[in-house]
Amino acid sequence: MKKKFVSVLLCAALAATVFAGCGSDNNAATADQGKASDNAGAADDSTDDSDMAYVKDKGTLIVGITNFEPMDYKDENGEWIGFDADMAKAFAESLGVEAEFVEIDWDNKILELDAKSIDCVWNGMTLTAEVTASMECTNAYLNNQQIVIVPSDVADQYQTVESLSGLNFAVEAGSAGEEAVQELGLNYTPVTAQSDALMEVAAGTSDAAVIDSLMASAMVGEGTGYADLTYTVGLSNEEYGVGFRKGSDLAEALNTFFTESYADGTMQETAETYGVTAALIEQ
């Protein structure tokens, strides 16, 4: 009986040893897998943390724009030109990549950026509170103003903010112009682009529009495609900047590029080409 009891104890001890050994091996394997996973994650995080590396790896800087003369617009050959377009091409070249321009719905610019459909928003973008909270923005590089556009033959009736209350406006959705008319409580219809707002006024489907002064100087008045329109009241002063994904290292790289371009005169030459010299901010 005693021998039988001892045998049972030995068997139990042996089984415990076997299971303990198996458990130790499994735990070690699990730990090794966890370390491998952590290391892989760290590598992914390292890649994700650098927009510069991401852009250089794919070889393109995708620039989100709208058709906005004199910032981004097409020449007779269908090529994108303008102050912003030319500066974007030069910046991309400094990175060793090519600039690719993609027209976006301005109201969706932040979504497009976060989804990596584009790498930056570079299109005469006003540095509003929403923009600076949602994007990694550069220093300001141009001054601007939101101004009212009306038919020339009624311009004398709309020279003050108070005189605008009965008008129906067309404004670009998600723009500083929309923000300005909202703050004043004016009636408006959102459109896809500032150029569409001008078309609405020219067609008589809207009484007025609010657009950027830099665009107005290029597209409104005598000698332009909208000779019968003019600008009257200024609603707000603002500054332009370029927006990247939040935390992007490309914003600081572009700040450095702006400083160097201003120092060597390239920025001033480009501004002169597109008639925005007076709006240029020293870098």
Image (tube, rainbow, N blue to C red):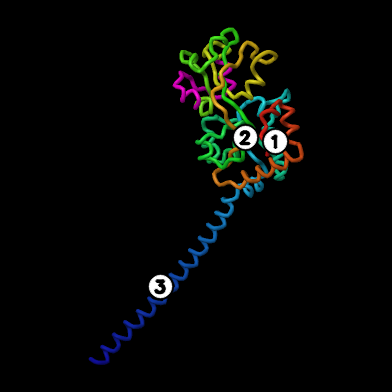
Q: Quadrant of the rendered structure where residue 226 is?
A: top right
Residue carrying label 2: 122
Disc 1, disc 2: CB below 8 Å? yes
Marks 1 and 2, the one that precedes in the sequence:
1
Mark 1–mark 2 Cα distance, whole angstroms, equals 9 Å
Q: Nearer the viewer, residue 261 or 16?
A: 261
Where residue 275 sits in the image (x, y, percent)? 71, 25
Q: Secondary structure at mark 3?
A: helix
As drawn, the label of residue 87 is 1
The 10 Å Cα crowd at callout 3, few under 14, some 14 to 19, many 20 or more, is few
Where residue 236 sits in the image (x, y, percent)? 55, 26
Where residue 112 sits in the image (x, y, percent)? 54, 36
Q: Quadrant of the rendered structure where residue 241 is?
A: top right
Provide the residue span drawn in magenta. 179-200
Please state which amino acid type lies under the numbered disc 2.
Trp
Q: Nearer the viewer, residue 213 or 94?
A: 213
The 10 Å Cα crowd at callout 1, few under 14, some 14 to 19, many 20 or more, is many
Q: Residue at x 73, y 23 (%)?
A: 76
Residue carrying label 3: 23
35 over 199 or under it: above or below: below
Q: Is residue 188 magenta?
A: yes
Q: Secondary structure at mark 1?
A: helix
- Judged left or right of residue 276, residue 46 is left
Marks 3 and 1, the one that precedes in the sequence:
3
Question: Which of the image's four quarters has the N terminus?
Answer: bottom left
Q: Residue furthest top?
A: 153
